[in-house]
Amino acid sequence: MAQATATVPTTSGSKYLQQLCKHWSHKLAVEFDAQKGTVTFPNAVAIMEAEPEALLVTVEAKDAETVERMKSVVANHLDRFAFREAPLPFDWK
């Protein structure tokens, strides 16, 4: 299993994760509350955790190529919801 994690500095992490989870819940399996959200894509999983000063984002998939693609998908969608702060800095590790 390959994965990448980013700590995204924002004080609106809870708001963004809830918006993103609601957005994706129309087509994907999603579980979330105010502090944590999990989105299950066909070939990957995105996990988001809100902290007071950051949003922790982890993308997991079977291979590194899928992780790379999903990093962009998640970052681009988050930037759309965080348009006042965009582009958010994603320091993937």
Image (tube, grey):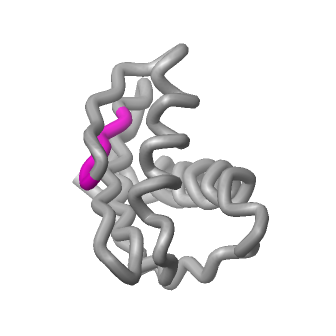
Taking the magenta stretch, the answer to whether it contains residue 36 is: yes
The image position of residue 73, as x and y in percent, is: 62, 49
Residue occupying the far top of the picture: 27
Quadrant in the picture for the C terminus: bottom left
- In the image, 41 versus 10, the foreground residue is 10
Give the tally of numbered discs. Answer: 0
Find out whether residue 33 is within the magenta segment. no
| Residue 43 in view of the camera | yes
Rendered location of residue 11, percent (x, y): 47, 76
* Left or right, 57 with reference to 73: left
- Look at 42% across and 30% down and name the residue there: 41
Q: Residue at x 29, y 60 (%)?
A: 49
| Percent of width and height locating residue 39 | 37, 36
Q: Is residue 11 above or below residue 30?
A: below
Would residue 24 appear left or right of 40 to someone viewing this image?
A: right
Hey, which quadrant is residue 86 in on the image? bottom right
Q: Can the viewer see residue 62 in this picture?
A: no
Q: Is 24 situated above or below 33?
A: above
Q: Residue at x 71, y 74 (%)?
A: 85
Q: Which residues are magenta?
A: 35-39
Q: Where does residue 27 sit, x and y in percent of width and height?
A: 52, 15
The image shows residue 83, relative to residue 92, as above or below, that is above
Drawn side of residue 42 relative to residue 30, left or right:
right
